[in-house]
Image: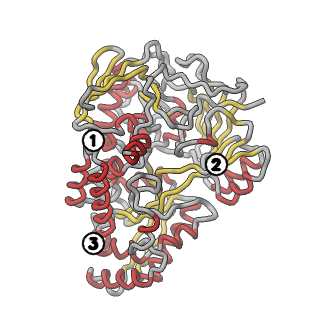
Amino acid sequence: MRFLLILLALIIPVNIFADSGLMRPGGNINRGGKIVTAFGVTTKNFDIYQGGSFPVMSHMYNSLVRYNLVDGLRTIIPDLATSWNTSDDGLVYTFDLRKGVKFHDGVEFTADDVITTFDKKIMNPPGNIVSVYKSNFEMVDKIEKTGKYQIRFTLKYPTLFFLNVLAAPQHLILPKHYLEKYNYDLKKQCCAPGTGAFKFVKYETGERWLYTKNENYWDPELPYVDELEMLHVPAWSDRGTAILTGRANLSWNVSSETWDEGKEKEDVEAALIPNFGAYWVHYNVKKGPLSNKLVRRAILLGVNQHNLINAFSTQERINLTRWTPYGDPYATPPSVLEKLPGYRKNDKNDILEAKSLLKEAGYENGIDGLTFLAASGPQAELLAPAFQEMLRRNLNIKVKIKLMERAMMRGEVLKGNFDMALDTQGHSISDFLPRATLWWKTEASTNMGGYSNPELDSIIDQMKGITDVHLKHSLVRQAESILDEDPPWYLVGYTYHLPMWSSKVKGINLANRASAEWGRFETIYIEK
């Protein structure tokens, strides 16, 4: 019973009082001024639902519900919804919507905007639209308008984490009239008006984004600051330096070296925050040698996860993990993990088995000519070369690294124009089911590379609606064993994020967050 209570606390941190959703950080709040951030903010895609950067653009928008900034993202509170109720069978969620809310262009927010966002941008996009978050809502049977300010979701099966999915910072509500104007495709449209605390001012390519306070925000108390300037700083060491020198107030993730320095400074604060995102090497399993699961299994065995983690230690702290992130109740314990082939530090026998698998697959003399995409920055400078070298040295697999801007690289991956691609992939929930449904199930919306395993699909389907802890544990272990034998991707490891900020920055509880979220700032302020 204690295990089940812990599990429920992790999966459904819901504010059971469902109050008005007004967040008040407390303290001696100071109004005015500007917050300057330092992280990667360049983008050539302005459609959040087609891969545009929500950490950059979310400040203009609201969701139905959201994680509470004030309590460290530990509860879910109303946002554009004011309250909700759930049917006894857990299949129907009814949301009452906030009245009197205006988009930045003055148009009134209603249930039509919610319905259109979920229908045309997520669940049933037109043929010209690619919905990267569609599989997040695989459990939804239908969404209906039940009044001008009320909507209803009907689920296919009870889903404990449904509110958590809704609260993810990328699931933002867009204006129906603007979506219709551009045929639901906003990739080239900067930027759709939102209902959020900040209004778009300008975007300078490769330099910065600038927002100003929304004077007509539906919560008249917020935001506290007048301006938000987001500097494009791709190198993590440069991000840390920007905080240490006072050029910026906050960064979501700096290099380990600058983070360590910041911990020693009186005017700087730093935190180590759990993150349900990981570094992966995506495979295109639809063509070439990587279409053979023996080759993919050989790479899992022949590339040492411990060495990759060590190679990146100056930049980011990575956990030794399996397919389920460390910290989740169903994660493989480290004491078990370190003895498994492909995860153990001493990989001599693993490399021998990997070579045998390559021979069985018809590649006894190795593989040459594979293209390896990597996003510009520390990943390309450290992780990609380390992965490349272990492939060459241990398996005689030769790959050519091709550097790309991250937003452009993800577009190429979704189109299938790659052999391997190093990138991050994360989820707001640690539970195996929503991650597998979004990433590894056949034809999932962010199934990078076209992976399909009917046996895994069957286990994913068996997990739906399950509340029995022991059965869920057994199914997760079966699924992870399948993924080890037939890997869709290579897992480098789940990370911690290393945010650092000026000690004068208050209001968003960075020092005590339950998990990492690169999200909104409406309660942030600068202490006098």
Q: Secondary structure at mark 3?
A: loop
Reply above or below: 470 against 513: below
Is the Cβ of the residue at disc 1 closer than 8 Å to that at disc 3?
A: no
Q: Which mark is residue 271?
A: 2
Q: Give percent across and percent down for residue 399.
A: 44, 74
**Relative to the observer, which residue lies in front, 221 or 115?**
221
The circle drawn on residue 138 is: 1
Q: What is the crowding at mark 2: few (fewer than 14 residues within 10 Å), some, or many (at least 20)?
A: many
Disc 2 is placed on an element classified as loop
Q: Looking at numbered disc 2 in the image, what kind of residue is underneath it?
A: Ala
Residue occupying image coordinates x 77% and y 53%: 264
Q: Quadrant of the C terminus?
A: top right
Q: Nearer the viewer, residue 72 or 123?
A: 72
Image coordinates of residue 34 in percent, x first then y, are 70, 31
Q: Quadrant of the N terminus?
A: top left
Task: Name the residue that disc number 3 marks.
Answer: 292
- Circle 1: residue type: Glu
Q: Earlier in the sequence, mark 2 or mark 1?
A: 1
